[in-house]
Image: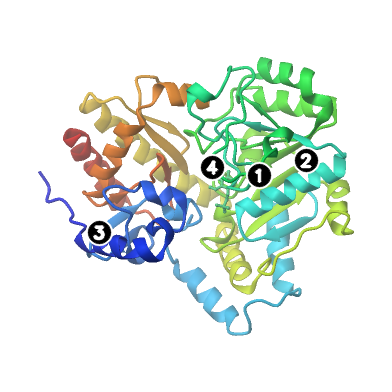
Amino acid sequence: MPELYRFDKNRELYARAQEMIAGGISSQIRRAELPVPLWFERAKNGLMWDVDGNEYVDYVMGMGPNIFGHAPDFIVDAVARDMRDGFVFAGQMELELEVTEMVRGAVPLKGPVRYASSGTEIDQVALRLARGYTGRSKYLKFEGHYHGWTDTVAFSVHPPLEQAGAFESPVAVPESGGIAPGSDHDIVIAPWNDLDTLTTVFEKHGNELACVLTEPILCNTNCIVPRPGYMEGMRELCDKYGVLLIFDEVITGFRVALGGAQEMLGVEPDLATYAKALAGGFPLSMMIGKPEIMAMLGDGRVQHGGSFNSNVMSMSAARAGLKHILENPDRFYRDLESRGKRLIEGLKRVGQEAESDLQVQGLGSTFWTNFTTKEEIFDYRDHAKNCDEEKYHRFAQAMLERGIRLSTNGRWHVASSHTDAEIERTIEAARSALAAI
Ligand SMILES: Cc1ncc(COP(=O)(O)O)c(C=O)c1O
């Protein structure tokens, strides 16, 4: 039995925070970290250190942005150098063009771009643009998909099944109190990964939809690569009914491949949004879109603003990160994928040895661990019915006590700086954690 970590100072700070910070945390998902939401002192590459002096191999990676690991020297140096000459200009700089040239070379969809700071924001811009362009107000959102926390999208991300309605025609279940009444009127919710059902939904609503907003590879409920033909079918339906197809590549962009999910799946949307891995840990989001659609942003018929859009630090980090990848993109993504695959194989192996129902699903660069007897999960309800979330939380806590930090929802983010030794350490910790739970 390894000596388990203690969290005394973490608990002390969390208790102190209760009066000062609502709930003691600054983003809802952090509340679920067990045994206590952690307080960190520093992080470098694959590792983090908390206020109790505990060292962790980290797979939260800021929920995805740190694709090179924490604080890589080449980003720290670039940002420190560039920020000496100013932070936020509310004006243009050549750096923006350099980043944009790299981005446009990488992403299959070609057209003008726009920048913002978070995934939530850029998804709002995409929705507004789709409505402005088509003159239609409804949009289609899939059960289990996450597009940020605003009133327009905070529906049916993880709805309780007893409230979710029929599989073919789900109810829009709000994720929060305080959402503006009527926000659900313009949302059509559908199950994902079932083309027959989607066809029926289009027959009913296709002519009134501005757009379909989808994670092209579902990363917010398990890690689900769409069934063969599903995305092609979605593309055809959108074309048939004059509906814009928006890929939310906030997680998949610059992570699953240089050209994101579009490159992997070979399907092109009309608009695509990016954030997380785009700037190696700095807040930057981006939308790219077909020129005739983006023209409405270009001439201001559709409005989009933001004081921090395209600030020096985020753009500098993006340039340094993209340059790093573009030195040898094939090698970068091959390495990232094979690192993750080694981890996945190791986790599956210790799961089998322990006769556990640990299930691992996804890609090398990002995947989920679940506790289920099913070999593969295909959609949100499949996940909600068959995966034991409470057991995952016990596993994540047991891993934390053994020096491995996992996300509270089950998603792992592999970084290019995770070392072989860290991966081995993770697999050994999983062996011990599975025995303990
Ligand atoms: C697919 C997807 N879209 C949008 C968002 C929102 O991004 P942000 O947290 O940067 O606002 C997230 C965040 O996890 C996401 O996973």
- Measure the C-alpha gap from mark 3 to mark 4: 27 Å
Q: Which residue is mark 4?
A: 176
Point out residue 423 in the picture as x, y percentages from the top left corner: 31, 47
Q: CA distance from mark 1 to mark 3?
A: 36 Å
Q: Amino acid at mark 4?
A: Ser
Quarter the N terminus occupies: top left
Residue at 73 percent of width and 74 percent of height: 90
Q: Residues within 10 Å of mark 3 (few under 14, many from 20)?
A: some
Instruction: Say which residue label 2 marks.
Output: 270
* Mark 4: secondary structure: loop
Q: Residues within 10 Å of mark 2 (few under 14, many from 20)?
A: many
Q: Is residue 165 above or below residue 87?
A: above
* Label 4 vs 2, first from the N-terminus: 4
Q: Could you tell me if residue 346 is visible in this image?
A: yes
Nearest to the observer: residue 138 or residue 296: 138
Label 4 – label 1 distance at C-alpha: 10 Å
Give the alpha-carbon distance from disc 3 to disc 2, as whole Å: 47 Å
Residue matched to label 1: 180
Q: Is residue 59 visible?
A: no
